Image: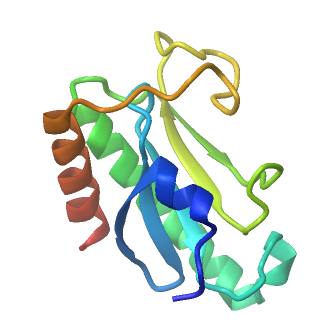
Amino acid sequence: MTGIDPAFLTTSEALGELALCHARLQADARFPWIVLIPRVSRARELEDLTPDQRRLLMDEILAAGHAVRAVAQALGRPTAKLNVGQLGNVTPQLHVHVVGRRSDDPAWPGPVWGFGAAEAYAAADLAQAVATAKEMLGF
């Protein structure tokens, strides 16, 4: 696997390897949230991917969306809206966020990025979220 920026290692839990991306569950109990990190050396922008890699990334974003919805459902907070973002302003390594949103989440209707401090999952909820995400992503 191409090296992962250390920032991801401290803010998320590993889920597994998809065809293109390393998948991680963001460690913020406020939002069901998966980060996809393409294993493409030195990729910083979508334009750094080949057309085939971009198509594969879209498929993996859709799969992550299904997993985010399943995690939210398993935790008793069904997702009403998926947000997908590729920012990279803080961590420049190419990565895509897939975030489940609902009208009663603390950042609604604004973006989740930079909103307050992350809240740790309770141990049982983290185990449930990781297991559900892994199952939905085929790990």
Q: Position of residue 28 (x, y in %)?
A: 44, 34
Residue at the image point whose x is 52% and y is 71% from the top: 59
In the rendered image, the quadrant that contains the C terminus is bottom left
Image quadrant in which you'd find residue 78: top left
Residue 103, above or below 29: above
Image quadrant in which you'd find residue 2: bottom right
Image side of residue 48 versus residue 102, left or right: right
Residue at the image point whose x is 46% and y is 10% from the top: 104
- Residue sitting nearer the eye, 1 or 79: 1
Q: Position of residue 60 (x, y in %)?
A: 50, 69
- Residue sitting nearer the eye, 132 or 52: 132
Regarding residue 106, the answer to whether it shows in the image is yes
Residue at the image point whose x is 55% and y is 58% from the top: 8
Image side of residue 44 versus residue 84, left or right: right
Residue at the image point whose x is 58% and y is 69% from the top: 37
Q: Position of residue 12 (x, y in %)?
A: 44, 52
Q: Position of residue 22 (x, y in %)?
A: 48, 74
Residue 93, above or below 123: below
Image quadrant in which you'd find residue 72: top left
Coloration mode: rainbow
